Amino acid sequence: MRYHGNMKLEEALKMVREENLTKTQLEDYHTKITDLFIQLQLECADKEKEEALFMSKKEPHDSVAQMKIFWRASAGGQRLIVLKRYISATSKMLDSIKRRLYLIY
């Protein structure tokens, strides 16, 4: 599973919620979602670097709070907000899959 935006993540969420998944299916989802989680983390790191560079351009008359607001309103800031929620949801999904696999073993 390659990460191509929130549609893939939403699809994965729906599929993993199915109650009658086999051990093999759960293991496959765990592998694919782990890959997705890693890709999200890497993109998040890139956006955090972008944020640091954005903040480094602060002028003396700009407040830090003002710059943070400008960053969060930018396309990069908006993407970072979404990425952080995706990472949180993906982490919870992986925990859920692990619990279900432990019940099977």
Image: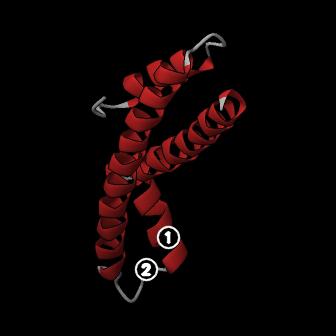
Q: CA distance from mark 1 to mark 2?
A: 6 Å
* Residue toward you, 92 or 66: 92
* Within-10-Å neighbours for mark 1: few <14, some 14–19, many 20+: few
* Within-10-Å neighbours for mark 2: few <14, some 14–19, many 20+: few
* Residue toward you, 63 or 49: 49
Q: Choose top left, top right, bottom left or bottom right for residue 14.
A: top right
Type of amino acid at the residue the image marks with label 1: Gln
Furthest residue in direction front, as rendered: 105
Q: Secondary structure at mark 2?
A: loop
**Label number found at residue 96:** none
Q: Choose top left, top right, bottom left or bottom right for residue 46.
A: bottom left
* CB within 8 Å, label 1 to label 2: yes
Residue 47 position within the rendered picture, expressed as x and y whole percent measured from the top left: 33, 59
Tell me the residue that label 1 is attached to: 66
Quadrant containing the C terminus is: top right
The structure residue drawn at horizontal position 50% and vertical position 41%, both measured from the top left corner, is: 86
Tell me the residue that label 2 is attached to: 62
The structure residue drawn at horizontal position 55% and vertical position 16%, both measured from the top left corner, is: 22
Furthest residue in direction bottom, as rendered: 60
The structure residue drawn at horizontal position 32% and vertical position 56%, both measured from the top left corner, is: 42
Residue 19 position within the rendered picture, expressed as x and y whole percent measured from the top left: 66, 13
Residue 98 position within the rendered picture, expressed as x and y whole percent measured from the top left: 61, 39
Residue 99 position within the rendered picture, expressed as x and y whole percent measured from the top left: 69, 37
Type of amino acid at the residue the image marks with label 2: Asp
Q: Secondary structure at mark 1?
A: helix
93 to 70, vertically: above or below: above
* Residue toward you, 75 or 91: 91
Quadrant containing the N terminus is: top left
27 to 82, vertically: above or below: above
* Residue toward you, 2 or 79: 2
Q: Left or right of 23: which side holds 33?
A: left
Furthest residue in direction top, as rendered: 20
